Image: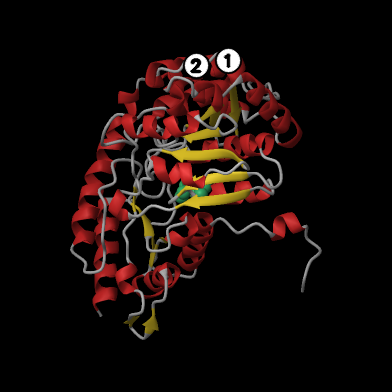
Amino acid sequence: MEYPLSNRINSLPVSQTLAMAAKARELKAKGKDIISLSLGEPDFNTPDFIKNAAIEAVNQDYNSYTPVEGYIELKEAICTKFKRDNYLDYTPNQIVVSTGAKQSIANVAQVLLNPGDEVLLPAPYWVSYSAIATLCEANFVEIPSSIDSDFKITPEQLEAAITPKTKMVFFNSPNNPSGTIYKEEEYRALAKVLENHPQIYILSDEIYEHINYGSPSFSFASIENMFDRTITVNGLAKAFAMTGWRIGYIGAPEWIAKACTKMQGQITSGTNCIAQRAAITAVLAPVKKVQYMVDEFKFRRDIVLDLLGNIKGFTLNIPDGAFYVFPDISYFFGKTLKGTVINNASDFSLFLLEEANVATVTGEAFGAPNCIRLSYAASEDLLRKAIKRIQKAVNS
Ligand code: GLU
């Protein structure tokens, strides 16, 4: 039966990361031994010093509505963090705290994009960018890259993609799904192109900033002339193992921050008060307090690269950040595995779910149809077991 839903929701694809996680959960509930490498979620617990800050906040009776844009103490703490880690000089009136970085991005898109505007998405890109643009009735334009360029785009590609309708470009480094990190000089070269197109705003998603095993993270807004045109997005989910707490934030030109506050004021109001109080402690904590998780992710990354690299048909780059590997598996296209014809990455991802009981996410969801994404935010044992199963399934 067709329900009378709006065109808006009907035009929206389901989030493939969340859909695959839900499918894995459903199969597990039915008793199947599924290893889920689909969702990008640290398998660590939130550190005790952050949990204790939340408990204290409960006991201090933080229970009322918060300012829509976030507690002033949290906004000040975020300014301190931006200065400490990113050499960015934001003031509290340029900060908006939201229910996860996803809402931060959705707010920014809603307040800047008109129907018909174009949003440039260097591919691969995180699944929800394109959906968020679609919700604004904007058109997203993919700028392709491949494993041969370490999944980076060039200034020439950026220039070629710009039209008079281009309003925004989304950068994401360290990148989900490829783990690629843009070096300072690479970002500066892209900024040079944007200097000639002052109508374009830059959204720089830096949520994986601290999960970095390569060159130091570099914030796009720290480039001269880019600060007043860039919205820096960050949050606590990944580095602090706080996915469910839902705390994201932006640093932005004040007029954009104000507009996001207005938008949020009509949709969700301020973010959860207890999570915000705990976030003050997390944001101000020295990064070395969570380094043990980053070290462990790097250890697992090396294991995964080593084991997957031994499977014929998996071509890998070395991801310098985040906790994903994004192998090119196009070698399998056109082949038949255990009676299943593999025509594309979705077929391959489904094959792995059915034959190896390993949940991954198809690269098509990220604008990279030759690849699949595996999250290594899982225990070493599970990772070894999962890759053994994958090897067995594809070698059959
Ligand atoms: N960002 C994570 C991922 O890509 C969490 C799921 C989501 O919100 O998409 O897996």
Q: Circles 2 and 1: CB distance less than 8 Å? A: yes
Q: In the displayed structure, would residue 338 be above or below residue 30?
A: below
Secondary structure category for the residue under label 2: helix
- In what element is the residue under mark 1? helix
Q: Residue at x 67, y 29 (%)?
A: 260
Give above or below for 266 relative to 310: above
Q: Identity of the amino acid at label 1?
A: Pro
Pointer 2 local density, CA inside 10 Å: few below 14, some 14–19, many at least 20? many
Please tell me which of labels 2 and 1 falls first in the chain: 2
Which residue matches tag 1? 92
Query: Can you give x and y, in whole percent of width and height, for residue 50 in the image?
Result: 44, 26
Question: Residue 270's quadrant in the figure?
Answer: top right
Determine the image quadrant of residue 206. top left
Would you say residue 331 is visible in this rendering?
yes
Q: What residue sits right under mark 2 in the picture? A: 79
Residue at horizontal 55%, vertical 37%? 100
- What percent of the width, then of the height, locates residue 390? 29, 68
Q: Quadrant of residue 117?
A: top right
Q: Residue furthest right?
A: 4
Q: Is residue 234 visible?
A: no
User: Which residue type does callout 2 highlight?
Assistant: Cys
For the N terminus, give its image quadrant: bottom right
- Residue visible at 25% across and 80% down in the picture: 396
Is residue 30 found left or right of 306 in the rendered image? right
Task: Write the residue at 42% across / 71% down.
Answer: 344
